[in-house]
Amino acid sequence: MLTPALAVIMFACGTDKPSWEPVPVPYCAVDETRVNAIYESMTRAERVGQHLMVGVDSDGEGNPSALTLQKLESAALGGVFVQPATGIVLGDPLATAAFVHEVKKIGYERTGVPLFVSLDQEGGPNAAVNSLTGGTDTIGSMPIGATRDPAIAFEEFDIMAREVRALGMNMDLGPVVDTLLSTRNGNLNTRAFGPDPDLGAALGVAAVNGLQSNLVVAVAKHFPGDGLTDGNTHTSNVFVEGDRDYLEATILKPFRAVVKGGTDGIMTIPAAYPAFDPDRSAITSRKITTDLLRKDMGFRGLVVTDALGMKGVDTGLSEGQSRGLEALKAGADILLYVTASPTDLEEIRADVDEAIQDGTYPETEFEESTKRILRMKQRYCLFESPDYPTDADLATLTNRLSQKADRTLARAHADRAVVLLHDDGILPLTGKKILYVGPDTLFQDPGSHWLNVLDQTFGDALAKHDPGVKQIVYFMPMDPNQQFALVKEQAPNADVIVMGTLQGRFSVDQQQLLEWVLSGIDKPLVHVILGVPFDYAQSRGRAAAAVALMGSRSPMVEAGAAVLYGELEASGAMLFDLDKLALETGFSGPKEPSNTPDRCAEDAVTCSGSGICVDFGAGFGCVCHPNWHSSPDGLDCVPDGTQG
């Protein structure tokens, strides 16, 4: 049944159900005698350290920072998490590889056990390794969904796996196999394959296989499934309603598929599911992690928590209860701390030690979980493969990244993902004078509030077909009054206006500008949807043409431009039933210019280097980008500069 309280969208399911038969993975043999010997040789602190996956950063010159060195030494870490800007270096993959391998070397020398090195590599806009960091731009999950082809899912994640492995990483906190059924879920947005759980299951299995065939541990997320509510677990306690049958038919189906298909990792989400556990979030729920995932579904791999700094982890916990300990007691293996001080890590070690001593956390469970981690490190050949790159490895690294064949393949995938929503006859644009209006290459995602950096705008892609294309681009959030004034000034010189919106469903300023251009400019408009396709609710029946790219990196924008200029026929499938989409766009008519002061100016925040200060509103504050560091909770950012 559909739960009336949820903002649920209908989806168009075909009668065919794509499937994927996984290719063999070259795992190494697991030696139980060796696993037992390693376990017995470790101190309790070192055993606890195997369960900790902690964010690491560099000193700005490609070396581990002093704080990272301290954490590796004092906490005997078993895993680390690498992020853009703090460890993955823009424009210098050699520096990234050197940093990652130095961290691995220090960690191994401390414990004698190799590190798991993880990152978020979901594809498309949500990929830490991309063209700007030395890798290949991939198309992203929702465009993969538009192709309905598991082979493309496999090939996209194969590209990503080979590149992250070349850089020294061996665990991907992905793919996202959530089923997107809510139009208000701005955090998930285009990270999901779409609203069809059967399709998501097939694509998820193929994506997992693409990673693991390159010996990169896939950690499918976010179990038992995101996509049904508008809640953001980073900042609030989220409750996912719906009875068990409904949840089984929607969000659980892809997870059952990837477990059966062989994923070696599952990430739990800090959201509560009353149908499974009326009290706790999935991260600290034994009913979900152990009873549902391990016993019912038969999962034998690693359970990795989502970031333990997220607000939703608190659901059902008493004040003072240890998030990490409760997650371990629920059945988790690896605790993800995006940021944690050495003191924080010492506290979790002490919490685990005390719980084992007093019997509230059975030592037999702790031992089995620790050995499960050691087995997985053997399974992924981490004890067998060289831990550090040789000079020859580094010399050839760039030859293994952003290969021409991979860029060509990603573009071929993009060509199959573009969705033509309608065309009143305005296309192709060849021979017409074009004014493009849309987001710049640096922007805040209006749905998730994350910062994104691209290497080209959609207008840049259009200009490759016609150098005469004029552009009006803006950073988001933006002032629609100012941008509309620029459009009015330049529109008389154009035959057609092409406007790109990115997550306009969550962006009142973009909705305002689109409305004014649609109603106030006497020129045909082509609407290009760079994020979730729900923006189409505003332009449907009003724009001369509309295409949904659902991705903003180079392969997708170049394929979209080729469609507009008639060089490519759009063949992507719209998985959302837009005919049945009852959606409030959030647009509420023309607005006066805001008198709210920009706090970056008000607080005199300055940014070092080339950083730009952005006022993200009350929930996020002022942020310097791209020069930023993680805040203590591991979620947002704080200024990298001085406040006057």
Image (spheres, helix red, strand yellow):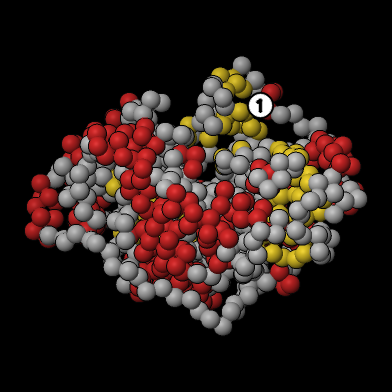
In the rendered image, residue 355, in percent from the top left (x then y), is placed at: 26, 50
Left or right for 349, reference 287: left
Total number of numbered labels?
A: 1
Image vertical order of residue 254 relative to residue 529, above or below = below
Which residue extends farthest top?
A: 644
Residue sitting at x 18%, y 36% = 109
Res 264 quadrant in image: bottom left
Residue sitting at x 61%, y 34% = 621
Image vertical order of residue 165 relative to residue 243, above or below = above
In the rendered image, residue 70, in percent from the top left (x then y), is placed at: 29, 30
Q: Quadrant of the C terminus?
A: top right
* Residue 252 seen by the camera: no
Observer-nearest of 486 and 391: 391
Residue sitting at x 46%, y 34% = 91
Q: Quadrant of the N terminus?
A: bottom right
Left or right for 485, reference 370: right
Left or right for 249, reference 92: right
Observer-nearest of 354 and 244: 244
Which residue extends farthest bottom?
A: 15
Amino acid bearing label 1? Cys
| Residue beneath disc 1 | 600
In the rendered image, residue 180, in percent from the top left (x then y), is placed at: 57, 64
Question: Is disc 1 surrounded by few (<14), some (14 to 19) or many (20+) residues within 10 Å?
Answer: many
| SS at circle 1 | helix
In the rendered image, residue 503, in percent from the top left (x then y), is placed at: 66, 52
* Residue 400 seen by the camera: yes
Image vertical order of residue 483 relative to residue 5, above or below = above
Left or right for 416, reference 294: right
Residue sitting at x 50%, y 49% = 137
Observer-nearest of 262 and 246: 262
